Image (cartoon, helix red, strand yellow):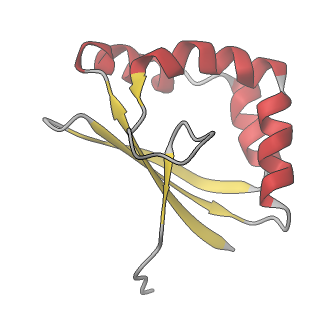
Amino acid sequence: MQRMGMLIGVKPDKIDEYKRLHAAAWPHVLAQIKGSNIQNYTIFLREPENLLFGYWEYHGTDFEGDMTRMAEDPKTREWWTHTDPCQSPLATRAEGEQWSMMEEVFHTD
């Protein structure tokens, strides 16, 4: 299992919409997440900085392959047409990233 964290901005005028979307997340998208070997996926909001912090645990063996299959899923792509306009990707993100992946520097159980 690999713990993963990521960060992105959220547009202040889109926070309510983003919360509404996730309060009624599409069942197909949730199934796609689970089918991509992701568990314990959580998104936190930090205001007034308007940052979203995402956390998940990856339980697979081919992260790139799982993420490629997720990105190719038509219903997931449709979901992103609703969520992406709410987000403000960080200027320092890596090429091809929407959310900026983070390095784990500490963990304790």
Identify the residue at horizontal 77%, vertical 19% (top origin).
75
User: Residue placed at 54% from the left, 48% from the top?
Assistant: 94
Quarter of the figure with the C terminus:
bottom left
Q: Quadrant of the N terminus?
A: bottom right
Residue 88, picture quadrant = top left
Q: Is residue 16 left or right of residue 21?
A: left
Q: Foreground: 49 or 90?
A: 90
Name the residue: 69% across, 54% down.
38
The outermost residue toward the bottom is 108
Q: Position of residue 84 (x, y in %)?
A: 52, 21
Residue 95, image x, y percentages: 59, 43
Count of numbered badges drawn on the protein? 0
Q: Is residue 100 above or below residue 23?
A: below
Asked if residue 63 lies left or right of residue 81, the reply is right
Q: Which residue sits at x=41%, y=19%?
A: 86
Residue 108 in the image, given as x and y percentages of width and height: 42, 86
Residue 91 location, x and y as percent? 38, 38
Location of residue 52 by image quarter = top left
Could you say which is closer to the camera, residue 16 or residue 7?
7
Q: Is residue 16 above or below residue 23?
A: above
Closer to the camera in the image, 31 or 82: 82
